[in-house]
Image (cartoon, grey):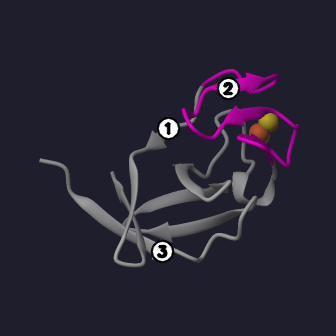
Amino acid sequence: TAEWIDIAAADAVPAGDVIGVETAGLDIALFNVDGTIHATDNRCTHGDGRLCDGFLEGHEIECPLHQGKFDVRSGKATYAPADKPIRSYPVKVKDGRIWLVK
Ligand code: FES
């Protein structure tokens, strides 16, 4: 069965923004797209870029290192040089907290 992990306060991610959270052995990027929270691995699949330092536009995150892009809803790479997906995680917001499944 799925084990939900408490990641952050529900209001920790400003609308239209991204934060990085390191917890439970994970390095996670949390995105707020129009009030919906999405979670992916924080580390870019192309190199050492940390997506929490990147630029979120709509549902796309641009990596700060070489400007590759990913869809934060699925983790799919959408713009070169990023070509491998980042892992995305199921998320829920409950009791004022953000939870995800590892
Ligand atoms: Fe992210 Fe190169 S490290 S695009």
- Magenta region: 57-84
* Residue 50 visible in the picture: no
Instruction: Name the kind of residue labelled 1 in the image.
Output: Arg
The residue that label 3 is drawn on is 8
The residue that label 1 is drawn on is 87
Who's the residue at 57% across and 54% down the image? Answer: 36
- Residue 15 falls in image quadrant: bottom right
Q: Measuring from the top left, give residue 29's x and y in whole percent.
A: 60, 56
* Residue 16 visible in the picture: yes
Asked if 6 appears above or below 28 in the picture, the reply is: below
Who's the residue at 71% across and 59% down the image? Answer: 52
Q: Ligand 1 shows up in which quadrant of the image? A: top right
Q: Which sits earlier in the primary sequence, circle 1 or circle 3?
A: 3
- Image-based side of 55 in relation to 40, left or right: right
Q: Which one is in front in this view, the residue at disc 2 or the one at disc 3?
A: 3
Q: Measuring from the top left, give residue 17's x and y in whole percent.
A: 74, 61
Give the tally of numbered discs: 3
Instruction: Report the magenta stretch's main SS.
Output: loop
The residue that label 2 is drawn on is 77
Front one among 48 and 22: 22
Q: Which sits earlier in the primary sequence, circle 1 or circle 2?
A: 2
Q: Residue furthest front?
A: 34
Who's the residue at 67% across and 26% down the image? Answer: 77
Who's the residue at 53% across and 58% down the image? Answer: 28
Instruction: Name the kind of residue labelled 2 in the image.
Output: Ala
Q: Is residue 9 magenta?
A: no
Label 2 crowd (10 A; few <14 / some 14-19 / many >=20): many
Cα distance between the residues tagged 2 and 3 = 25 Å
Q: Is residue 59 magenta?
A: yes
